[in-house]
Amino acid sequence: MYIQSWFTSRSAPDAPINDIHLIQRLKSYDDSDLRNVGLKIMLRHSWYLSPELATLALFSKQVPDEEKSELISNMIVERESHLY
């Protein structure tokens, strides 16, 4: 379950998408006890996620261009809402 995430953890731009993929794999895991423990661990691990760190995904080759464009649009809307 964790091997793929472990080997790709050295890439900061890929960290957000790798965490999302790991959560998706955990959600579909057959053993409910292990699934619940894994998801709780990921919830505690997600403290570092912030709008600023989400921008790392812009430099990931794993994130499709459409999602990068949506991320930029959301950042612009968020910035404009804080200006007024």
Image: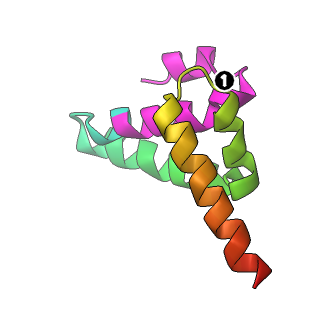
Residue 30: x and y, percent?
21, 34
Q: Nearer the viewer, residue 34 or 57?
A: 57
**Which segment is the magenta one?**
1-24
Query: Is 7 within the magenta?
Result: yes
Q: Label 1: how many residues lie within 10 Å, few (<14), some (14-19) or many (20+)?
A: some
Whole-percent x, y for residue 60 in the image: 63, 26
Indicate yes or no whether the magenta region holds residue 26. Answer: no
- Quarter placement of the C terminus: bottom right
How far from the left and from the top, in percent, is residue 55? 70, 44
**Who's the residue at 53% across and 54% down the image?**
43
Quadrant holding the N terminus = top left
Q: Does residue 16 appear to the left or right of 82 in the view shown?
A: left
Task: Work out whether 84 lies above or below 69.
Answer: below
On the image, numbered disc 1 is attached to which residue? 9
Per the image, label 1 sits on a secondary structure element best described as loop
Residue lying farthest to the left in this orientation: 30
Give the residue drawn at x 69%, y 28%. 59
| Amino acid of disc 1 | Ser
Farthest-out residue, bottom: 84
Give the quarter of the image for residue 33.
Answer: top left
Q: Main secondary structure of the magenta part?
A: helix
Q: How many marks?
A: 1
Q: Residue 37 appears at what percent x and percent y?
A: 42, 46
